[in-house]
């Protein structure tokens, strides 16, 4: 059998230990337990007052909803308390350093929130006559130009709703370009260190995926890649800096080889924070790159979304980009180009990827961020991000093993492995121990090419003092793992919850609340 | 009845031209707690080395390959309700599927218990 | 620079620790030709908060905001009144700046909220289970078609002509690459598409996709379609672009839909010029392992306390890679939270009251507008959105109304450019934010424009 995920991760519950005396409420001072809305509210309570509806003759076609729906309501005070209490059980960037490699958890400026909520942006309908939304179209256009200039590319698709959606956009543009050339190239090459969305996206678009190995130095094996190029290869999906936090020095060489063989280069832009303002992917031969606005450009992660994934395109791919998009007309006005104008303005478009035209709420926030930093500030962002990561990398030398530490600097993230931890101790234990120290753990078990990977990305919005404290904490936990401190096996001890039984959740999925389920029996 | 092993950690127990297939104790230990197993439908044609079944733990999914070619005669329905059988009894009640062999000569390349044990020790 | 805490002293000290002479040493792996010597030329330098705000205010003022004018646009995005607490709660830093809840011990806030959200969506739609949301209704609709293909192992989807044209366009784009066949038809203002759908279902059909209420606002019973689909081993996918409707009309799940998807924007999220929105996705229990997107499940921790985790992750791309159920990585977390808070504030009582008010206003508006000479109401049935047939091209009318400061609906010409039979159609949405005065203003303006 294969091991699709060779990282070595295994769930371990750890053991419970003796606790302090329980309280009547189950609360622990400011750590407050909170029930479900289904246990607090009921179907007759509501926190919203409406004027009485005027009496009219129903036009519902006889399809009135008569059965109870089962939606509990709460008064406003109960609602505010419920969600406030829930919020306090979350770690967040606003609370502390969030060292998640590949996620770029930087400070989310509040100016972004203020600007995004201006009535003229938040209270306009996407289908309003275009002359009534010129300011909104202008925002999209300005952001588009910034992204093109920062990346040295030719065009940009603004409509993809998230990074993975942007990857799909880039791959579909490549497929459309190949179809236009009348060429059938069924294979896409993906480095084995790539994030799982890369092969998933390629497979969705109908390509078969082949892995390219990495060198011992953690970069793409250029010789192996070149050897595999041929008339059946549509292109390569590469991440730069790569998922090990290293700059792919040979990217231009790779791009030239791929182009010479008739293929295209897709770049996963998740790690753009390392090079923004210092390097342009367009100068390295990239044909398409998605940009995660929620990473490099500070739009909030929101507990899992929404994101936004505009895709910058080379001159070769720009004609195939999706509709709709915003064009600036000679008279200075802005036009949203939709299906009816496609023949005139984007005849080779591969089509529409989403209803309406993109994540406007993310555009205002990202543009606010970009304007605040400017060309000089953005360059400083990349420099401080890389400086911070290297500071972490070198400060932990001797404590944690960095598999590529000897071969040169890292970029914006530092990669460590679990080599050197005591027998029976894993990356998972280090992660859970870090929680007790007041941090969200770093990215673990990714990339898969390194055993027990720990990927640390501090970002540029951390002060030196914050970094020093984090380094001290990680050093302390790592040493405990190396010495085999048994209390780590049952960490975290101080979080709102101890380790959770993920096996039970997967074997007996309970995805909705049911009246009968008043307790869960553990196996 | 003879039991063979593959270097992909499947076992196959052969009786005449029919066989039972599962994954080894080593494999289930590597995967951790199994949460789901998808077995092939009756009548499915399998090729040696091709995808036959899927086994999932919480954070990993692995393909189980067919050790030899044949047609599926039965899938282990017990795994749907209790995937933990693969952990507790991988080489017995945690079997995945039975098949009718189409080419018994394919068994020649497989390991016996001693050879498999030596193989695992070398990993 | 206000967002960058490092001082030059810090930078020097850190370079010393690293053993690098300058920051350039850390960029040593960048080929010489690709190194930019300084800030990218031609781009502005950094700006103060005040300057940025001023720039945005100027752009914002160029837009006609819905709150300031009589507003009647719908077509897949609806203006509802969002209670004040919703926006305050979603701006709490622990929600706004939290990550995907992969470390559940310190993410129970997000996870419990998602569990509540999933339950609310499942109940609203009349389904067994729901996921933790998707990007939006149109991508959720496409994902449902993909899922139906996996479940039935067939590749022909029958799409109702009443499905939002953007959703149809997305499906067409995706099908071009996946090789699925889409059975489509032109929208007709008079005829129901149901007979054609029933006729098209056969043993090759993977699914039938029907919008409820449809793009023109019409409400039809889905039971017959569900029945015929099941007879042939196909799935019924219902698409709901206005979830508030389900406070008044039967849920698609009750009528036999296997998968119900929709757009949650109406509750908590606001118009936002098209995004971010929140896709809703629910289905029958037996299809759970084929569902795309994130799922939150209940479990216990090491002390036996109830807790929540993301579960069934092995369907997802970061594990299955090329064998994933979809390439989707993210859900629309903060928007799902806004939806859930709004729904918790409403409760069943509030949702029914809200729906009743919407419908009543819509009925009043339809009656008043149909009084205008030359204007006819197309719909027999509707919830809060209906179609008017005007005596002239509706697209021109919409522009003229805008000039009179009335945002008077969406012309069918905007949605279906080139369809001559539809060009006099005007789609009018009437929610609880519309006052009787607004209706009168709209009617007067429309009468003037048509005169």
Image: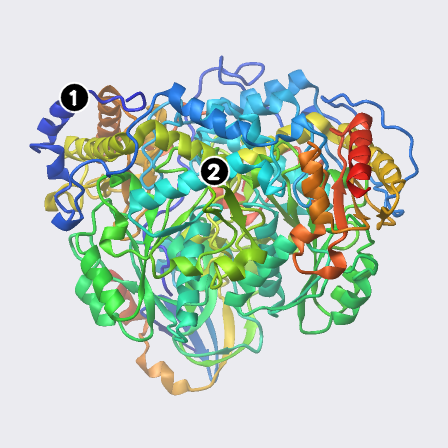
In which quadrant of the rendered view does residue A373 lie?
A: top left
User: Which of the numbered marks, if any, corresponds to residue A138?
Assistant: 2
Residue depicted at x 23% and y 19%:
A465
Image location of residue A455, percent across then percent down: 28, 40
Q: Is residue B70 left or right of residue A53?
A: left
User: Which of the numbered marks, if any, corresponds to residue C8?
Assistant: 1
In which quadrant of the rendered view does residue C258 lie?
A: bottom right
Image location of residue A282, percent across then percent down: 27, 52
In this picture the colour scheme is: rainbow
Task: Give the distance between the C-alpha atoms of the residues marked 1 and 2, in whole angstroms.
Answer: 37 Å
Both on one chain, marks 1 and 2?
no
Name the image quarter holding the C terminus of chain A. Answer: top right
Which of the two discs, 1 and 2, sits closer to the camera? Answer: 2
Q: Nearer the viewer, residue A152 or C17?
A: A152
Q: Is residue C187 above or below residue C80?
A: below
Residue depicted at x 16% and y 30%:
A395
Image location of residue C362, percent across then percent down: 82, 37
Q: Is residue A467 above or below residue C448?
A: above
Name the image quarter holding the N terminus of chain A. Answer: bottom left
Identify the element where label 1 is drawn: helix
Q: Nearer the viewer, residue A352 or A393?
A: A352
Image location of residue C26, percent across then percent down: 14, 38
Identify the element where label 2 is drawn: helix
């Amino acid at each position: 059998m294969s091991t699709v995920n060779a990282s070595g991760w295994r769930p371990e519950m750890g053991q419970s230990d003796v606790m302090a005396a329980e309280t009547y409420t189950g609360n622990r001072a400011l750590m407050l337990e909170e029930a479900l809305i289904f246990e607090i509210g009921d179907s007759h309570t509501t926190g919203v007052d409406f004027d009485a509806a005027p009496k009219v003759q129903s036009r519902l076609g006889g399809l009135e909803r008569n059965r109870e729906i089962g939606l509990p309501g709460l008064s406003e005070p109960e609602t505010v308390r419920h969600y406030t209490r829930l919020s306090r059980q979350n770690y967040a960037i606003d609370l502390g350093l969030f060292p998640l490699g590949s996620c770029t958890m930087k400070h989310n400026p509040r100016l972004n929130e203020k600007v995004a909520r201006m009535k003229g942006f938040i209270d306009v309908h996407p289908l309003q006559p275009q002359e009534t939304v010129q300011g909104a179209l202008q925002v999209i256009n300005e952001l588009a130009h910034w992204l093109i200039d920062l990346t040295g590319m030719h065009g940009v698709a603004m409509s993809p709703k998230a990074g993975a959606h942007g990857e799909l956009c880039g791959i579909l543009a490549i497929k459309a370009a190949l179809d236009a050339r009348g060429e059938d190239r069924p294979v896409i090459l993906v480095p084995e260190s790539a994030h799982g969305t890369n092969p998933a996206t390629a497979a969705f678009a109908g390509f078969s995926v082949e892995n390219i190995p990495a060198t011992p130095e953690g970069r793409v094996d250029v010789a192996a890649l070149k050897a595999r190029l041929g008339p059946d290869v549509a292109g390569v999906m590469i991440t730069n800096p790569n998922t090990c936090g290293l700059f792919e020095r040979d990217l231009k060489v790779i791009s030239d080889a791929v182009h010479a063989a008739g293929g295209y280069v897709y770049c996963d832009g998740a790690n753009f924070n390392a090079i923004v303002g210092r390097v342009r992917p367009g100068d390295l031969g990239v044909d398409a790159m998605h940009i995660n606005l929620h990473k490099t450009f500070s739009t909030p992660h929101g507990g899992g979304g929404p994101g936004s994934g505009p895709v910058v395109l080379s001159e070769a791919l720009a004609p195939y980009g999706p509709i709709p998009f915003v064009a600036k007309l000679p008279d200075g006005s802005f036009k949203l180009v939709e299906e009816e104008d496609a023949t005139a303005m984007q005849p080779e478009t591969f089509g529409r990827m989403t209803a309406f035209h993109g994540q406007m709420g993310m555009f205002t926030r990202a543009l606010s961020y970009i304007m605040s930093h400017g060309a000089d500030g953005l360059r400083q962002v990349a420099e401080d991000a890389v400086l911070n990561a290297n500071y972490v990398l070198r400060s932990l030398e001797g404590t944690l093993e960095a598999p590529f530490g000897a071969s040169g600097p890292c970029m914006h993230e530092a990669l460590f492995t679990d080599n050197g931890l005591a027998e029976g101790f894993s990356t998972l234990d280090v992660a859970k121990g870090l929680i007790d120290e007041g941090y969200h753990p770093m990215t673990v078990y990714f990339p898969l090419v390194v055993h027990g990977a720990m990927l640390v990305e501090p970002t540029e919005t951390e002060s030196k003092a914050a970094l020093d404290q984090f380094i001290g904490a990680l050093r302390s936990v790592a040493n405990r793992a190396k010495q085999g401190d048994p209390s780590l096996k049952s960490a975290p001890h101080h979080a709102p919850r101890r380790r959770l039984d993920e096996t039970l959740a997967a074997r007996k999925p309970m995805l909705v609340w049911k009246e009968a389920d008043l307790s869960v029996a553990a196996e | 009845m003879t039991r063979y092993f593959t270097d992909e950690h499947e076992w196959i127990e052969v009786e005449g031209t029919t066989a039972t297939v599962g994954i080894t104790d080593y494999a289930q230990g590597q995967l951790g707690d199994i949460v789901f197993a998808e077995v092939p439908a009756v009548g499915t044609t399998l090729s040696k080395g091709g995808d036959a079944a899927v086994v999932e733990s919480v954070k990993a999914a692995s393909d189980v390959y067919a050790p030899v070619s044949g047609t599926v005669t039965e899938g282990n329905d017990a795994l749907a309700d209790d995937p933990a059988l693969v952990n507790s009894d991988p080489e017995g009640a945690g079997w995945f599927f039975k098949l009718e062999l189409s080419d018994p000569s394919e068994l020649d390349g497989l390991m016996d218990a001693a050879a498999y044990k030596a193989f695992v020790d070398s990993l | 620079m206000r967002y960058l805490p490092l001082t030059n002293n810090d930078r020097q000290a850190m370079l010393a620790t690293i053993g690098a002479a300058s920051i350039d040493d850390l960029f040593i792996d960048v080929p010489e030709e690709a190194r930019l010597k300084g800030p990218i030329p031609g781009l502005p330098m950094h700006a103060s908060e005040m300057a940025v705000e001023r720039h945005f205010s100027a752009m914002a003022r160029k837009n006609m905001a819905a709150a300031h004018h009589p507003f009647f646009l719908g077509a897949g995005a609806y203006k509802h009144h969002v209670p004040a607490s919703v926006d305050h709660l979603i701006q709490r830093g622990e929600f706004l700046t939290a990550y995907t809840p992969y470390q559940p011990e310190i993410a129970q806030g997000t996870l419990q909220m998602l569990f509540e959200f999933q339950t609310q969506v499942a109940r609203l739609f009349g389904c067994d289970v729901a996921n933790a949301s998707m990007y939006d209704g149109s991508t959720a609709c496409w994902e449902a078609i993909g899922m139906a293909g996996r479940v039935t192992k067939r590749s022909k989807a029958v799409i109702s002509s009443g499905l939002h044209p953007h959703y149809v366009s997305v499906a067409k784009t995706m099908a071009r690459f996946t090789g699925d066949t889409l059975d489509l038809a032109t929208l007709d203002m008079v005829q129901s598409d149901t007979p054609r759908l029933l006729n098209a279902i056969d043993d090759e059909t993977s699914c039938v996709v029907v919008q409820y209420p449809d793009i023109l606002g019409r409400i039809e019973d889905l039971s017959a379609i569900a029945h015929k689909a099941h007879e042939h081993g196909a799935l019924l996918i219902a698409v709901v672009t206005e979830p508030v409707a389900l406070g008044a009309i039967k849920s698609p799940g009750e009528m036999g839909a296997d998968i119900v998807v929709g757009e949650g924007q109406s509750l908590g999220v606001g118009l936002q010029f098209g995004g971010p929105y929140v896709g809703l996705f629910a289905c029958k229990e037996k299809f759970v392992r084929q569902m795309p997107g994130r799922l939150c499940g209940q479990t216990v921790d090491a002390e036996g306390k109830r807790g929540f985790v993301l579960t069934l992750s092995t369907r997802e791309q970061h594990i299955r890679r090329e064998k994933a159920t979809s390439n989707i990585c993210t859900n629309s977390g903060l928007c799902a939270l806004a939806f859930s808070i709004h729904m918790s504030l409403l409760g069943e009582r509030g949702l029914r009251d809200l729906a009743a008010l919407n419908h009543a206003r819509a009925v009043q508006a339809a009656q008043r507008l149909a009084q205008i000479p030359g204007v006819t109401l197309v719909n027999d049935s509707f919830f809060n959105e209906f179609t008017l047939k005007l005596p002239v091209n509706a697209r021109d009318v919409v522009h003229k109304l805008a000039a009179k400061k009335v945002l008077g609906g969406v012309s069918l010409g905007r949605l279906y450019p080139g369809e001559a039979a539809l060009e006099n159609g005007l789609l009018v949405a009437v929610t609880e934010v519309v006052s009787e005065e607004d209706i009168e203003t709209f009617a007067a303006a429309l009468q003037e424009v048509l005169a």
